[in-house]
Image: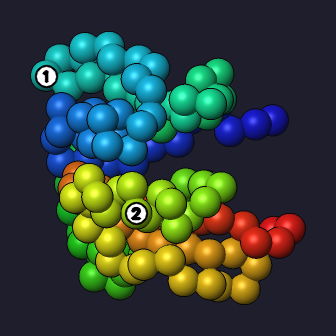
Amino acid sequence: MRIALTSIFVDDQQSAEAFYTDVLGFQLRHKVPIGADFWLTVTAPEDQGGPELLLEPASHPAVEAFRAAMTTDGIPVAQFAVTDIHSEYDRLSGLGVRFTQPPVEMGPAITAVFDDTCGNLIQLLQPTADL
């Protein structure tokens, strides 16, 4: 068994597609119209056959309260691994990405947290030891 797909809720799929591809550098995998929305997935460019991230419309009634609580408490809804968190922090900051937490050592890893402009906090993680 392996993870094939996971999802995050986004306020606007078009804006999310632009942010996740143009800013973060993910590759568009699927964009299939489903009524007014899309089955919209992205993958890591170095692992295009790997897990997909579904950028799912945040229209379900439970989503607003869930995301508000997560954001208020500063809890990221997803985590992306990077090999050089300081370079990635500098690159994304230079592109206007707003970080809520700069890179910080946390035990066997360095983490940073940013606002994805789509209603979510996302954590970057660089392992510094075997996790």
Q: How many C-alpha atoms fall within 10 Å of the one at disc 2: few (<14), some, or many (≥20)?
A: few
- Between 23 and 74, which is closer to the camera in this rendering? 23
**Residue 98 at what x, y percent from top left?**
26, 67
Secondary structure at numbered mark 1 = loop
Type of the residue with mark 1: Ala
Which comes sooner in the sequence, label 2 or label 1?
1
Q: Is residue 110 above or below residue 61?
A: below
How far apart are labels 2 and 1 at the CA level? Answer: 36 Å
**Residue 91 at what x, y percent from top left?**
39, 55
Discs 2/1, front: 2
Secondary structure at numbered mark 2 = helix
Most extreme residue toward the right, as rendered?
130
Judge whether residue 52 can be spotted in this image: no
Residue 60, labelled with which disc? none
Q: In this view, does 86 lie above or below 118?
A: below
Judge whether residue 9 can be spotted in this image: yes
- Between 41 and 44, which is closer to the camera in this rendering? 44
The image quarter in which residue 19 lies = top left
The quadrant of the rendering that contains the C terminus is bottom right
**Residue 106 at what x, y percent from top left?**
64, 85
The residue where tag 1 is placed is 36
Q: In this view, does 128 lie above or below 12?
A: below
**Residue 92 at what x, y percent from top left?**
35, 56
Type of the residue with mark 2: Asp
Q: Residue at x 35, y 26 (%)?
A: 40
Q: Which residue is drawn at 20% across and 25% down?
A: 37
In the rendered structure, are the residues bearing label 2 and label 1 in contact, judged by CB atoms less than 8 Å apart?
Answer: no
Relative placement, left or right, of 8 versus 48 is left
- Between 130 and 13, which is closer to the camera in this rendering? 130
Most extreme residue toward the top, as rendered?
32
The residue where tag 2 is placed is 90
Q: Residue at x 65, y 65 (%)?
A: 126
